[in-house]
Image (tube, rainbow, N blue to C red):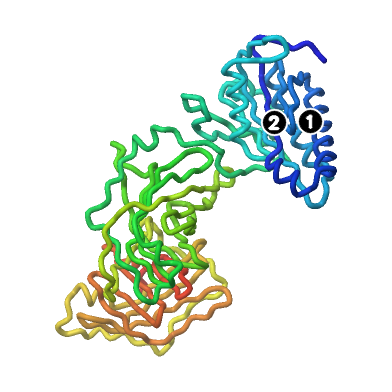
Amino acid sequence: MRALPDGVLTLVFSDVEGSTRLAQGLGDQVWADCLEVHRKVLARAFASHGGTVVDVEGDGFFVVFRRPTDAVLAAIEGQLALARQPWPSNCSILVRMGVHTGEALLRGKHYVGQEVHRASRICTAAHGGQIVLSQATFELVHNSMPDGVAFFDLGEHRLKDLDDPQRLFQLRAPLLRPDFPRLRTQPPAHIAEDYDAPLPEDAFVIEPGPDVPEALRPFAGKWSGTMCIASAHQQHKLVIERIEPTIAWAVWSVGLVSTGDGEAVWFRQPAAVRNGMLSMLINDAVMNYRLKSTNEIEVDGQRWGYPHMNHLSGVLKRENMPTKAFTQEEPTTYWPMGIDTLQVRESTSENHAVFPSTMFIDSRAPGVAPERTKWLGKWSGWASRGCTCDVKLAVLSVTNEEARIIQLWAATGVDADPTIRSAKFVGDELVMRVDRLRIAYRMRPTGEVELVRFNPDGLVIWGVMGKIE
């Protein structure tokens, strides 16, 4: 065995994720063979970059390097070699690695001290196939890596038995898996302390109606917990005010959406009810909420346009909040966050809606208020993410209570229906309902019309239209 170095070293810990489950599933002989191959593969990778193996215990390695770049390159080589290895068809050996640089105290044939514990805890927080670095190692190596190697800031994390939060980084390299769930850590204690989220005064919870399935009824209420993404932990608060078979009406707030003094900003918007869960677009993430029990919700989400920081997860717990008796009265439309910033433009649909040639707009409206007559006319625009729906609206006539309209909705494979329908004025909105389909419209001061459509299957689509002369 090579003599153990001392002083400032880079420490690498590794172990196999889910080793107990693998051993049980493969049987003793096959698991022993896989473990031996794993050891030979990693030992060869570590040795090729000057690493000294301190300990091999079970399915884990403890290796030290004099140079941090050697440690990082050895970790990459080890992961790539493991990924190329032809494992048995019913098994996949995934190894997590933690890398940290610090002064390790040598006592006989062992290293002791806080830096050793820190490196070990970093490894424990990682996932199989992932390489996680401490800030100390990152600062020493990030400017001296080969092309294609990059680092992703995972933010601060609390590691077991360590008092101060640790800033951690994930290494990325060609052919290595780029994205993982959040680290197996607890959020920094200051997150909860810095975030104040008193409910808005008009928040409420209505008892679910008789047509709501029993499995969905527990969603109604107030929920609070931690939602985590790769770079941050967020306090997430949610109130499901009203739940219907295909639509839920929610208010929400997260810790990173706040005013300058840390107080919460709340948003109201609809959520789709599908396959026993709620789905809602929060900022740039599609969030799914599933009931783990009557008192816990599991949160899982995916961000749009962030390939390296796209997964969100967490658990919300029920909090006490009074419940109002069920009422059939239709709730106010919950307009999706950010709809007021959408710009009018052409849709990207291959199928376009066309107004009927016989359509006639009756401008005669004696005794009708100006806030109603301003709706007379035609609008054209888009809806859905990517502008994939071509939408047009014609308001043919109005009274103070309702309007006759044609709503055209075309998309690839979907033709527009030119049927004339009735819509009701609800405050400043125009609302059309056909069975369980609901479309609400509201007009901006500049004349554009925003729309949000609630499909019978729970899908929520929105967009904007500009007036046609």
Image coordinates of residue 14 in percent, x first then y, are: 69, 31
Residue at 22% across / 81% down in the picture? 401
Q: Is residue 94 above or below residue 389?
A: above
Q: Quadrant of residue 180?
A: top right
Q: Residue 251: in sight, yes or no?
A: no
Q: Foreground residue, 214 or 349?
A: 214
Q: Amino acid at mark 1?
A: Leu
Describe the element under mark 2 as helix, strand or loop.
strand
Residue at 36% across / 79% down in the picture? 433
Quickly name the residue at label 1: 42
| Mark 1 closeness class: few <14, some 14–19, many ≥20 residues within 10 Å | many
| Mark 2 closeness class: few <14, some 14–19, many ≥20 residues within 10 Å | many
- Mark earlier in primary sequence (2, 1): 2
In the rendered structure, the answer to whether residue 82 lies left or right of residue 228 reads: right
Q: Foreground residue, 242 or 259?
A: 242
Work out which quarter of the rendered image holds the C terminus and state it: bottom left
Q: Residue 229: in sight, yes or no?
A: yes
Describe the element under mark 1 as helix, strand or loop.
helix
Q: Is residue 106 above or below residue 459?
A: above
In the rendered structure, the answer to whether residue 96 lies left or right of residue 252 reads: right
Image coordinates of residue 29 in percent, x first then y, are: 85, 43
In the rendered structure, are the residues bearing label 2 and label 1 in contact, judged by CB atoms less than 8 Å apart? Answer: yes
Q: Amino acid at mark 2?
A: Ser
Image coordinates of residue 351 in percent, x first then y, are: 55, 75
Image coordinates of residue 121 in percent, x first then y, are: 59, 28
Residue at 71% across / 40% down in the picture? 19
Quickly name the residue at label 2: 14
Residue at 34% across / 78% down in the picture? 432
Task: Quote the CA–CA distance across marks 2 and 1.
Answer: 9 Å
